[in-house]
Amino acid sequence: MFRIGLIGCGAIGRQHAYRLRWETGGVTLVGVADFVAEAAEQTAAALGVRAFATGEELIASPEVDVVFITTPDAFHANYVLAAIEAGKYCFCEKPLAPTVEECLQIMEAEVRYGKRLVQVGYMRRFDKDYMEMKRILDSGAVGRPLILHMAHRNVSQPDWFRTEMAVSNSAIHEIDICRYLTGEEFVSGQVLKVRQSTESADKPYENPQIFLLETESGARLDIEYQCGECYGYEVECRIVCDKGMLELPQPATVIQRSKATHSRSTEIMQDWSIRFVDAYPVEFAAWVRDLQNDCLTGPSVWDGYAACQVADSLNKSRGTGRFLPIEMVEKPELYR
Amino acid sequence: MFRIGLIGCGAIGRQHAYRLRWETGGVTLVGVADFVAEAAEQTAAALGVRAFATGEELIASPEVDVVFITTPDAFHANYVLAAIEAGKYCFCEKPLAPTVEECLQIMEAEVRYGKRLVQVGYMRRFDKDYMEMKRILDSGAVGRPLILHMAHRNVSQPDWFRTEMAVSNSAIHEIDICRYLTGEEFVSGQVLKVRQSTESADKPYENPQIFLLETESGARLDIEYQCGECYGYEVECRIVCDKGMLELPQPATVIQRSKATHSRSTEIMQDWSIRFVDAYPVEFAAWVRDLQNDCLTGPSVWDGYAACQVADSLNKSRGTGRFLPIEMVEKPELYR
Amino acid sequence: MFRIGLIGCGAIGRQHAYRLRWETGGVTLVGVADFVAEAAEQTAAALGVRAFATGEELIASPEVDVVFITTPDAFHANYVLAAIEAGKYCFCEKPLAPTVEECLQIMEAEVRYGKRLVQVGYMRRFDKDYMEMKRILDSGAVGRPLILHMAHRNVSQPDWFRTEMAVSNSAIHEIDICRYLTGEEFVSGQVLKVRQSTESADKPYENPQIFLLETESGARLDIEYQCGECYGYEVECRIVCDKGMLELPQPATVIQRSKATHSRSTEIMQDWSIRFVDAYPVEFAAWVRDLQNDCLTGPSVWDGYAACQVADSLNKSRGTGRFLPIEMVEKPELYR
Amino acid sequence: MFRIGLIGCGAIGRQHAYRLRWETGGVTLVGVADFVAEAAEQTAAALGVRAFATGEELIASPEVDVVFITTPDAFHANYVLAAIEAGKYCFCEKPLAPTVEECLQIMEAEVRYGKRLVQVGYMRRFDKDYMEMKRILDSGAVGRPLILHMAHRNVSQPDWFRTEMAVSNSAIHEIDICRYLTGEEFVSGQVLKVRQSTESADKPYENPQIFLLETESGARLDIEYQCGECYGYEVECRIVCDKGMLELPQPATVIQRSKATHSRSTEIMQDWSIRFVDAYPVEFAAWVRDLQNDCLTGPSVWDGYAACQVADSLNKSRGTGRFLPIEMVEKPELYR
């Protein structure tokens, strides 16, 4: 029974804390921490666990075997590095860190430690439909992927959202899942300028955006990013292969028909936070099995770095009108 | 080149006259007639053909080889009988006649004449999707039909519409197409009383209605009849067989997506008159080929009678709460 | 924290035991029992809980607060009655009991006890799509239900399957969910004889079967039951209402397209045991909340009785060719 | 009644000759011509019209009011120029001509003549679904187009097919229809190199191919071109707008369900020649109406030139890895 301490008691942190406390076998949530002491205390009280004064204290505590990080992105690297230093397993919500530099720093630390300790929370890899696509691709039934079309649509974005975040916060999921599905790295990318939507004329970010990427084998991925109430939260993925095509299904919802209109009657399409909610228990269960086997197999620090590097390169290509090569560091032995 | 005279210049009559005049190979529309002289004259003028004073005159005219009847139902039998008497081929819009007695009278006349002269306008048999269902059924690919589900929904009905007409005017299409698809006659039927829709509380007819039918082999058909603005014009057909299931597709229309709603953007779903509009040219072309071969193969007087007999029996079962046997006359040699 | 003892360590029993042990908040699985001592011991060992010698011992044990029954149907009544006698809450998998007599005996015992203790495992009521249909119906957005079409298809049945079980084991789910969705009881029903499938010519049961039911308000339900490899496991539900129509969606699965064929690529359609697997956690969580509130709201003994009574009446109508009235006992105050 | 002469008695020529002879109101097919005299004679005999010795003779004949050109592409310009010289209306199948130079020559001739005489056979503009998309776009209901995704898939290609033809013969339809739908010209384009399909490893052309285009307003179009038996003939079109999304429906076909597979049961998906077969009568009827009004409104010489210029520019961008500007001549007053 692994004793888990969770750092970061915001929205997703509280959800994960609840899952770890009540719905996950093989682990015990023993305590939480937060930059805001009150937040930690409230969450601790609600779940009947200990509130640690700081994340550092939590990581250092002999009561905590495994660290779970759900803080704002900017604090990820700090706590992940501390966990590695303490030689403790550590689950870090995506992204691993906002900058390539921090990702590389973490990679260096983990490589020095000599063993994978960190898993990054790319939960889509544990969504049953993406997993099924992966299974079919790996089976060879439809041949190799040639062209991938993806779309990511949000209903709205917070005030602090900026153009670059469409890559680094949103499309980074598509970047990761494409790497996972194809088993390939990206070699070049480009952001296409596109006619802007009237729906977000007064917003401080470009909308829509198109991202073009090329993989090692020459397969092409285009990602359409969009934000607007008119669409709802939507994720699309279609993979054109040598012998057939795979499509990610949209979530099944009750159909309400009236006057030649079909309405999807649930709110699932409006809220990103529940689109992949079923993936979390699968993700956590797989992670706990790996902890029990003392051998992590989920998204690694390399995966966290790679997605960050691709996002960074894409953002640098803005305005150049060209495909920029994506230069990645050499992959350490630990991640092969 | 067959010279055609058309009787009945109402809506469907004018449409058919136009088709025969401009869009049908192998025939020439030479004249029209109508109970209302003006209607005939207007249609004749618009199409550049002769206006006959009466249907009888048209049928008798040496200028007319083939008679086309699109009058109100009540006048069908009269003109069909006259055409048979004149020994002329005759296309009669569905239904053949409103009463079993008239259908039998026509059958007797045609049998006496000794050759098929009459084709009844059950155009769904020439719809590409029903034809494809027929082809698959006949191929044996999905085994034999066991259970058939059909639905027929209208947006509205005229003032003179009454409960029984849901069978004799509307569901009669389903009765005919089921006979066509299965190649079987019906042996018993029942109208089920069902909770009535608030949408037609002030209407002089029952709505919705359910019709249950059993074929010779024991296959079961249920037909759901409904009238209401909320649904649009819709025809459904699903056939459950030994080895698979066939479904009639809904017409393809542009999909407009917005806020998790899919709207079908054309008006096709609101208007019965265009749901099967593509079937008419196919129907007419097949009929002309048969005329050229001097051998009719389309829906016959027997088919017209059978549908009428089934409708009649269904309406007689109302209120009995039981399946009534459907007693049909012996099938004349001519129709085997 | 409720201490739960589970009786019946077969397939569904072991699954539920695992869920209660590892994946359900607010409860602790403390022990299991089974008619076969070894089965109980194995399950107990696997989950690290106690093996009771008998179900009776488990029910009587002061270590057990709440009883969970997943034995074969024939033993349900016995254990449920014992649990009521012991004044303990009790969750009993569907059906409550195979006979109307046993259901009535349980109802009498619970009414005598004066408080609801028993919940029956009709898990579809906790499926998100049926719940959404219920929500929409209750909202009035589409008016009242007039006609309900349901289908239930199995890939295969065990050797001991018989004609009547198509109602009492399979369609009983449709009977319950229709009662739940409409809030109405059934007043009459009929089994329709239908042409038999060649796919099960050598089987000791009729296939397919059609069940017709009428609710208090006159709404009509037809259930198509079928068993055959050609279809896969499938549940259909469509509700035609005054102002619109609701349809249960099929589970979303990856679509594999090739040569104008769309294949659903997962096995979900072949296996009943996972079709509603997501409903169990919802069902258990709702039940635990009710235990905490000391007030059950899920499917009751009355619901268990009603489904059994309807199934019984349907089976008695076989061969009569008529709708038989469904006579139910008066509903005790406890269940209103 | 316009007297039509048709030049080019190949496959599409014979089909169009039949349509003009038997199925098109307001015109009479009076004769045909072909480079191969026998082909003209056979077609003439089959349809009961005159066989002209040459296309030139046909164009010059006082019996012919209107010229219809269905020859191989290479001969289009020659006959179109002759028809303009003769001052006769002329319908030319797509493309107007294979080279930009020929298109410009035709444009010059028509402009000199001072009146539109030529219509180019871009039949998709007369497909009901594309027309409906156009109607919705023009209505403003979904805002302005921002991103357009199109795909064009062929089952196979003839021996003489080469890489560039994927643009100039196939995707040229997408180029035209995008111009039609958006009402915009293209300003730049690029062919993306993409991983090649194993299915056509031994073929003398690249497969698949991706074409990227930018319109005047900055809207982005990507066209996926592919050839392979695994897909069937397929045309896709999705338009992402400010306020909603439009999708071209796939043709409705009977659905055959079996073992969780849905097969589309007709061959429509395998054969390009019937995908848009319903568009031809609409196209011809609209053209005849325009002839009667003495004012052409269908696809013009400008449209023929523009599509050719875009295709030419795209093909020139191959291997450059960049978007090339598409330089078009100034639009003559005649086409505004």
Image (tube, coloured by chain):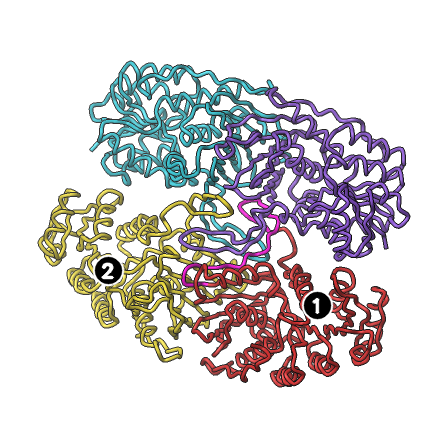
Chain colours: A cyan, B red, C yellow, D purple
Foreground residue, D263 or B27? B27
The amino acid sitting under disc 1 is Gln
Instruction: Give the magenta part as a residue range.
Output: B240-264
How much space separates mark 1 and mark 2, taking CA atoms?
A: 80 Å
Task: Indicate which label's residue lies in the foreground, 1 or 2.
Answer: 1
Q: Is residue A138 left or right of residue D158?
A: left
The amino acid sitting under disc 2 is Leu
Q: Is residue B21 left or right of residue C230?
A: right
Residue occupying the point 81% across, 49% down? D51
Q: Is residue C263 left or right of residue A230?
A: left
Q: Which residue is mark 2?
A: C117
- On the image, the x and y values in percent for residue C234 come to 39, 56
Chain assignment, label 1 = B
Q: Secondary structure at mark 2?
A: loop
Q: Which residue is mark 1?
A: B292
Q: Is residue A271 above or below residue C301?
A: above
- On the image, the x and y values in percent for residue B115 come to 65, 79
The reply to whether dot 1 and dot 2 touch (C-beta < 8 Å) is no
Mark 2 closeness class: few <14, some 14–19, many ≥20 residues within 10 Å: many
Chain assignment, label 2 = C
Whether residue D273 is visible: yes
Question: Where does the C terminus of chain D fall, quadrant-wise?
Answer: top right
- On the image, the x and y values in percent for residue D284 come to 76, 50
| B260 magenta-colored | yes
Q: Secondary structure at mark 1?
A: helix
